[in-house]
């Protein structure tokens, strides 16, 4: 019931389910109703120290916070007086580890993005379109692998193409404008998808629309991007999420407003989008540059 009500996307449901089951194994001698803050705190320490890891290695702070978040959500929901599955919320007294923002430099420069796309293009249409969609649209990888042909549509003028992200983070929908440089090669790629010979054209078209454009796993997309970055010698451990950061950074750097980027990326809060401003300000003219200009006559 909790997963169905509070987790809108299947991706979130899967992650929350895994996190809750991991905790249930830790407190196998108790039911969820009997848990106190002590068990939650011990679980957190076990994750940090590596006691709750199969490998015995300490978990990163971000990983620990990510494993505690589903428990907080579960107990907050279940201890609501109108639901009353749990007598209390044992997570309120447990602090999550402070997670430092280490993604500020997880982006590609304009030239690096070009090199990556060129490498992907050499590998074939599919890989090229995957990279192009991630960079131009700023999609999460889970959103990319779920895109279907029927998610694209024209605006009322018939001039521009838009993508409806049906099931974004938190089950939210949003509209993302699709540049022609992506849409023009995407159309023939969609048309090349195989159609069973014995089916009628109407049924075949219906099945094509229902089929994901990129019927591959998230892990496969991650491997495609990582290998391409390695092959073109970028010297960075590039992930699909790096391309989402690249989208936001380049958009702000070349004149997009915070609100435009927030709507395109599907951020619930402006604070999330504002994190990219620090990176953009670093790329622009910095204080030493102004000092240099003022003293230029003396150099």
Image: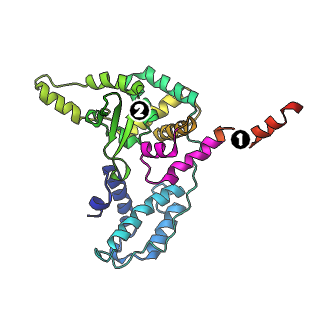
Q: Do tag 1 and tag 2 residues touch (Cβ < 8 Å)?
A: no
* Quarter of the view holding residue 218: top left
Return the residue at label 2: 133
* Horizontal relation, residue 192 to residue 227: left or right: left
Q: Is residue 77 above or below residue 273?
A: below
Question: What scheme was used to colour the molecule?
Answer: rainbow
Of the numbered discs in the image, which one, if any, rests on residue 286? 1
Q: Residue at x 36, y 26 (%)?
A: 183
Quadrant for the C terminus in the image? top right
Q: Is residue 144 magenta?
A: no
The x, y position of residue 99, in whole percent, is 55, 57
Magenta segment: 256-281
In percent of width and height, residue 128 lies at 42, 26
Residue 125, picture quadrant: top left
Query: Mark 1 Cα within 10 Å, few/some/many (few <14, many 20+)?
Result: few
Figure quadrant of the N terminus = bottom left
Question: Within the magenta stretch, is there residue 275?
Answer: yes
């Amino acid at each position: 019931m909790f997963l169905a009500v509070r987790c809108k996307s299947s991706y979130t449901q899967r992650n929350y389910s895994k996190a809750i089951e991991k905790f249930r194994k830790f407190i196998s001698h108790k039911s969820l109703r009997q848990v106190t803050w002590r068990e939650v705190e011990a679980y957190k320490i076990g994750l940090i120290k590596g006691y709750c890891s199969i490998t015995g290695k300490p978990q990163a702070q971000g990983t620990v916070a990510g494993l505690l978040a589903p428990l907080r959500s579960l107990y907050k929901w279940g201890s609501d007086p109108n639901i009353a599955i749990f007598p209390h919320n044992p997570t309120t007294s447990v602090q999550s580890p402070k997670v430092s923002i280490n993604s500020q430099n997880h982006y590609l420069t304009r030239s690096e993005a070009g090199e990556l796309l060129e490498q992907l293009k050499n590998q074939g249409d599919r890989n090229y379109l995957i990279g192009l969609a991630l960079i131009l649209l700023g999609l999460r990888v889970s959103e990319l692998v779920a895109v279907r042909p029927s998610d694209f549509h024209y605006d009322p003028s018939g001039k521009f193409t838009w993508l409806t992200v049906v099931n974004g983070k938190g089950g939210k929908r949003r509209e993302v404008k699709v540049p022609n440089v992506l849409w023009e090669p995407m159309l023939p790629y969609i048309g090349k998808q195989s159609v069973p010979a014995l089916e009628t054209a109407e049924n075949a078209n219906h099945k094509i629309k229902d089929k994901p454009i990129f019927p591959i796993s998230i892990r496969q997309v991650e491997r495609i991007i990582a290998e391409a970055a390695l092959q073109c010698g970028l010297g960075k451990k590039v992930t699909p999420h790096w391309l989402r950061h690249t989208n936001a950074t380049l958009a702000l750097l070349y004149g997009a407003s915070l609100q435009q980027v927030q709507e395109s990326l599907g951020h619930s809060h402006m604070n999330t989008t504002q994190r990219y401003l620090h990176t953009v300000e670093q790329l622009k003219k910095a204080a030493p540059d102004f000092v240099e200009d003022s003293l230029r006559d003396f150099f």
